[in-house]
Amino acid sequence: MKTAFVAAILGAMVVSCSEAPKAPNRSGLLPPIGDQGSRWGAALMGLGRRGELVTVLGPIEPNRPAAIAKCAAAESSLGRNHRMMAAREFREAIGLDPTYAAAFEGLARCLIPEGELDWAEPLLRTALRFEPQFGRAKFELGACASMRGDFERALTIWQELERSEPDYPDLYARLAIACHTTGDHGAAVRYLHRADLRGQRVPSQFRSLIEETGGRS
Amino acid sequence: MHSQRRVSVDPACISASETTGAASADGKEILAGFIGFESLSAIRNAFGVSSDGGKSWAHVVVRPPTALQDAVEGDPMTAYDPRTGTLFAGGISRAKCIYVARKIPGQNAFSPSTVARQSDWPDKGWMAAGPKFNQPQTTRLYIAYNEGIVWSDDLGDSWVLPVSLGTGYGFLPRIGPNGILHLSYWDGWWGIMYRRSLDSGQTWSSANQIGTRMVSWGVQNYGIPGTFRNVTNNAFAVNPVDGSLITIFVDQTNVVSGQKNLDLYLLRSLDGGVTWGPATRLPFRPLDKISDMIFPWIEFTKNGRLHLFAMTTAYNPGQIDGTAHGLWDQAYAYSDDLGGNWSPLMRLTPSSWDSAFHNTGSADFLGDYQGIAMSEKSIFPVYPDTRTGEAEAYVNDVYDPIERASAFWWSLGTPVSGGLASIHKHDGKAATATASWTTGLGLATMAEASFPVPSASPTSMRVHLWAAASGINLQQRLELRNAATGAWEAVDVRPATLGLSLVSVVVPNPSKFVAAGVVRLRIIHKSVLRRPSKAYLSSVDQCVLLVEP
């Protein structure tokens, strides 16, 4: 069911090889949808290539108000746990305005709990291209790294977020855990103190673990 | 504990995993559900079905109505309603519906399925059956799934529209005392979540994050030997004795020699979900050992014992995360104090099995959870195992051998304190009586008890007694009543002790003491020497039978 979920969400997203020749062959997963191709193609190059969105090709007439409204609908769907509907709505928002960072981030947010990190990360990087100080996208990019077990990379991303948005919710709790996992006891304890100062949600078992192990991971 | 038995007995099934279970109170009727792959493109909700207490099994596929069938039907779920004795089985038809069927009593068959909800994308449902809030003579059957919760008040024939439960994964409903409806789930990120309803599902408390994981991952493979996905659905159960709640979740504790270690963590509420204590790690792995536990499931039996089982690499420590051939087992443990202390881990599988032999092709699938079928006396963990070269579904019969007295009285002596409840647990709160002896030998105190036993011919029986007598030169006799002759036969005779001491005695030929499902027992303290009149106190702190049916 998981593969079908992704396919259904991205099913109308197209990479037309003639218009985006650098996209990989995903034709089995991504059927074409006509003249949306040129507008979508470049926006999706990042998805297919698992890298950054490079350039938006072709004429773009972004409709930001419509994209905002569509994202609001998507959030409402997500609030009712209609993830499929929410993902489709975020996807439609991307089509309405392929420069709207929140739409890319929202779609990523639908995909991350599904474990679809290969899809979510380029979406988040795309969001950050359009809005470099997008805290939520940055936090979630760090979360993707931690969900891969790459706590060094998660640390790098979250420390970058710390510089721009130190009060991001639960950031220091996550930093503390990431430091502990990578073996940096001193930093873990420092971040834990900062998390406590800000009343952030620190797992109780993490405190016990710090005490039990003296901070050794 | 009995050795494992295979329940996915249809040879056409090429892989079986993602298990669930339910059983009747007497344990005669059992459902062991699983996703059964008939091929890589024909996936079914299948159920091992037994109507003889697990001695024999049939493999029954339960499908939705024809118009709503799909190539992919999965997410099996089960429930048992104690009031009507009804067993339910159900599942999801991809992109079409959630459906339910009732087991036909005494037969390894089901009634035709009914549709609980048609939907474009139903996902992961779990069922619960029991009374509506404060209405003990009712039955409401609930299904909680990704879109919310639905219910039926006519054993599944008709259903209401869903009430949204907000965002989350793995909504697991449980019905507690007084019909309070509890719900555990995870938020897809780090949150372990809880809600409850005091009006049978119409309205809900706010989503409460009762715990937080240190590390999270989605529907993916993470941190384990093997390449199958290990989703982190919560395990959750309500104590029928006092309504306390237990949630168990998986978290990454540490990294040892580059290998992530996943452990089980417990959250406890003693006030029906209003407040929750901190998360504690279950004590099954020394911190420096490399091993994992995943897919936990818990149930309470009627006596308040908490049963846990999980998939584990504890019997093959030191494996590398992500290795193609993960060696796994299933293990069981129990707790009699809401998870404060645990029995040692007991291995359910005869030997480890290789995760690579799931036989689901590139899906690399061994399910997203496991389940337990539970009767009043036995629990049947249901789980996948690949020892035949493909994943098959198995159960063990893990029975609770303790039989507690249904009646207790002093036929000689003057009762001082305690009674029937006092002899159920060894807790220092004994049932006591005084007696005095006159000059000469003779009976002094005599306590009697009756025990219900589940079998007319138990294969073994043991008496487990904590007793004391405060006088000196007293004898303690433990006697059982012969069912055929009515005579009392001594099974243990020894000096009584001043302080409580344990007598644990195997009863030879136990069937001769079973009369109409009852065993009669008596404990005698008497003087063995001539003494002048003197009072003493006789105490019985615990007296139970351990019976293997």
Image: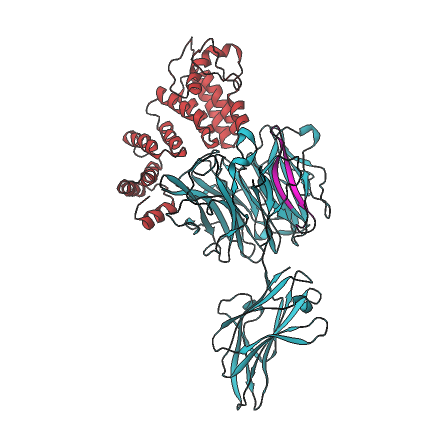
Chain colours: A red, B cyan
Q: Can residue B405 be seen at all in this image of the molecule? A: yes
Answer with left or right where residue A151 lies relative to residue B407: left
Total numbered labels: 0
Residue A116 drawn in magenta:
no
Answer with left or right where residue B479 lies relative to residue B533: right
Give the answer, above or below, for where A144 lies relative to B488: above
Residue B37 drawn in magenta:
yes
Residue at 69 percent of width and 37 percent of height: B113
* Closer-to-camera residue (B27/B266): B27
Give the answer, above or below, for where A111 lies relative to B497: above
* Closer-to-camera residue (B205/A173): A173
Q: Position of residue B300 (x, y in %)?
A: 55, 53
The residues colored magenta run: B31-57
Q: Position of residue B455 (x, y in %)?
A: 67, 61
Tell me which secondary structure the magenta stretch mostly adopts: strand
Answer with left or right where residue A94 lies relative to residue B95: left
Residue at 49 percent of width and 19 percent of height: A92
Give the answer, above or below, for where B280 lies relative to B473: above
Give the answer, above or below, for where A45 lies relative to B190: above
Q: In which quadrant of the rendered image does the N terminus of chain B lie?
A: bottom right
Q: In which quadrant of the rendered image does the C terminus of chain B lie?
A: bottom right
Q: Can residue A1 be seen at all in this image of the molecule? A: no
Q: Position of residue A184 (x, y in %)?
A: 28, 40
* Closer-to-camera residue (B136/B359): B359
